[in-house]
């Protein structure tokens, strides 16, 4: 008791800092630490798979159609799950994704939507998740630039 | 016990807490998942190549265009006024300063739609709300702006204004990218220096 009284100010300051550090470190954040590590597959481009090759992935697959229009998914698989992109984090659908043991494949007619949703889910800790995409050369520059080689007219 | 001793003990304890913290300098998403989801699904985060073309011809200094491709690709051809942050380096510490430099808009582009949209999710996840994507990337830029032509007989005022903007942007793009490599580099460096000066930094 004597010691506590003696070091009252010191203990107060240290306790406050300790509590703040604990709140900051252990606070509820649904995203994983180290965003770069979870974005790594996009740098290696190992997170996209074509419709032709998705069957080669081991394990039970969950194909998610992110479009509101459900017709797209039937072209790929009959047992896909329709989850509109804006509902993917709702309790009902998130439970399905979390409980699924095997590769998760995201499909959308808009490449940008599947790319954005992939990043959100990956940063939440899903590491067996892919983008189902047939446009393999999306990030390839398809045009040839022709420089203007004509000399400027002299005035 | 005097104040000096108390202060020393506090410092020692704080040092101890600091030593126990995880040694990770890496960054993590800070916004809430549902908040991020609604942001990444917001149509306003997409800009068309025509909107970007207008920013370029007006030389709008409140807009920063970020090329996410490799330095080699950037050197070969790039949108005038853009700066290069390869996608693989986006999560390095320096890029945070670039995104947070007070510009009202940071517009990402790559060749297609993947890297720019990954980058948007990352930037928004890190709470950079001033980030946008040029939809379709450089491929769409070439398809719409560089290959624009008019073949009809009559033209509406709106079509004319759009065509004019595309032609001017195409001219700027061609002029800048036709410069020899040495001059192009100087042009890019001068842009960087000018941007740093505006931000109050030093070279």
Image (tube, coloured by chain):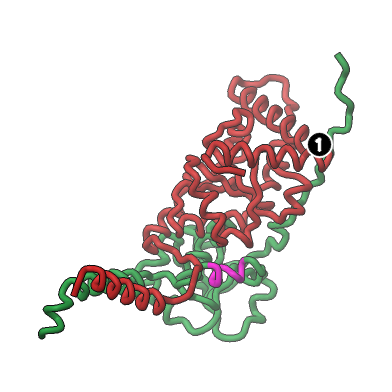
Q: Is residue B21 above or below residue A115?
A: below
Tell me: B130 left or right of B58. Answer: left
Residue A39 counted in the magenta span: yes
Q: At which x and y percent is residue B162?
A: 62, 28
| SS type, badge 1 | loop
The residues colored magenta run A36-42
Q: Is residue B97 above or below residue B202?
A: below
Q: Is residue A16 above or below residue B155?
A: below
Residue identifier under label 1: B179
Count the marks: how many? 1
Q: Is residue A152 above or below residue B145?
A: above
**Residue drawn 65% across the image and 56% down it:** B86
Q: At which x and y percent is residue B1?
A: 18, 75
Tell me: B132 left or right of A9. Answer: right
**Residue drawn 68% across the image and 54% down it:** B69
**Residue drawn 38% across the image and 70% down it:** A30
Q: At which x and y percent is residue B85?
A: 63, 53
Chain letter of disc 1 in the image: B
Residue B179 counted in the magenta span: no
């Amino acid at each position: 008791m004597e010691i506590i009284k003696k070091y009252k100010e010191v203990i107060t300051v240290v306790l406050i800092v300790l509590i703040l550090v604990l709140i900051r470190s252990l606070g509820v954040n649904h995203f994983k630490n180290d965003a770069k590590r979870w974005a790594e597959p996009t740098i290696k481009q190992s997170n996209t798979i074509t419709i032709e090759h998705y069957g080669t992935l081991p394990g039970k697959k969950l194909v998610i159609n992110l479009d509101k229009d459900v017709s797209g998914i039937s072209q790929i698989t009959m047992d896909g799950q329709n989850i509109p992109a804006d509902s993917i984090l709702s309790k009902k659908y998130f439970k399905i994704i979390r409980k699924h043991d095997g590769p998760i494949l995201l499909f959308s007619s808009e490449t940008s939507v599947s790319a954005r949703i992939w990043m959100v889910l990956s940063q939440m800790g899903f590491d067996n998740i892919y983008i189902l995409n047939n446009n393999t050369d999306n990030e390839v520059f398809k045009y040839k630039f022709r420089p203007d080689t004509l000399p400027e007219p002299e005035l | 016990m005097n104040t000096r001793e108390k202060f020393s003990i506090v410092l020692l304890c704080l040092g101890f807490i600091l030593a126990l913290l995880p040694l990770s300098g890496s960054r993590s998403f800070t916004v809430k998942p549902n908040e991020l989801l609604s942001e990444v699904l917001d149509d306003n985060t997409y800009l068309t190549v025509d909107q970007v073309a207008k920013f370029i011809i007006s030389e709008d200094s409140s807009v920063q265009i970020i090329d996410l491709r490799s330095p080699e690709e950037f050197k070969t051809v790039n949108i005038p006024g853009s700066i290069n942050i390869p996608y693989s380096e986006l999560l390095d510490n320096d890029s945070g300063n670039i995104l947070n430099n007070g510009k009202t808009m940071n517009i990402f582009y790559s060749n297609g739609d993947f890297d720019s949209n990954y980058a948007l999710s990352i930037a928004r996840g890190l709470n950079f709300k001033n980030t946008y994507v040029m939809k379709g990337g450089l491929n769409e830029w070439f398809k719409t702006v560089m290959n624009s032509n008019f073949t009809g007989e009559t033209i509406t005022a709106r079509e004319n204004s759009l065509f004019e903007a595309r032609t001017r942007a195409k001219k700027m793009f061609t002029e800048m990218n036709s410069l020899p490599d040495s001059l192009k580099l100087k042009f890019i460096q001068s842009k960087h220096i000018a941007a740093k000066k505006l931000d109050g930094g030093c070279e």
